[in-house]
Image (cartoon, rainbow, N blue to C red):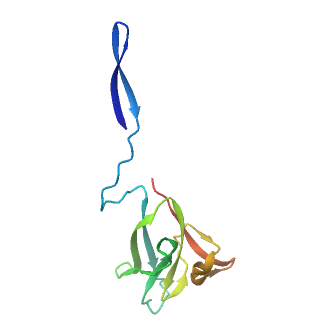
Amino acid sequence: MAHFIGRKSNGNTTKQVVRLTPNARPHAEPGHHDQQYGFTKVFRWPVPATQTPQPSAVEVVASFNGWHKIPLSYDAPTKTWQLVQREIPGNHTHRYVMLVDGKPSFDKTCDGLAVPLGPEEERWQIETPKGPRVMLMFAQTK
């Protein structure tokens, strides 16, 4: 917060008055990202102990990138595929699906499931006992 200190006079005495005024939101410098509006998500897909052979590719497709495939990297010591995705628009619910060797797969860390809306979501939907679904991610920032 910005502080404004002024003097207020009433007759013979002068007293200091402190007024608090909010700072205007500073303009972002070129090349700097505004943390308030960006969200970072770590996608992880652990290889199930019973899965053989090992998948050759794990990807995520999502509403935040126009439903384009983004590959995850394999971490051999943890037997986990992972991706750190930055610059996701914050304060928004995004929809996504994990693809294992090109086939839609469930992400047990998702924030919820939703009925697919539109052709892109229908293309990547997963089948559940309650019907086709896509995963939800709540990209909330402070």
* Residue at image location 62% in from the left, 71% down from the top: 114
In this rendering, the count of numbered labels is: 0
* Residue at image location 37% in from the left, 25% down from the top: 18
Percent x, y of residue 64: 48, 70
Taking the image as shown, residue 31 lies to the left or right of residue 129, namely left
Give whichever of 78, 111 is nearer the camera: 111
Q: Quadrant of residue 80?
A: bottom left
Is residue 133 shown above or below 18?
A: below
Percent x, y of residue 51: 49, 88
Percent x, y of residue 13: 34, 9
Is residue 33 shown above or below 114?
A: above
Is residue 27 shown above or below 120?
A: above
Q: Quadrant of the N terminus?
A: top left
Q: Quadrant of residue 117?
A: bottom right
Q: Quadrant of residue 16?
A: top left
In the current view of this chain or complex, which residue is farthest to the bottom? 53
Give whichever of 46, 12 is nearer the camera: 12
Percent x, y of residue 33: 35, 60
In the current view of this chain or complex, which residue is farthest to the right? 130
* Residue at image location 68% in from the left, 79% down from the top: 129
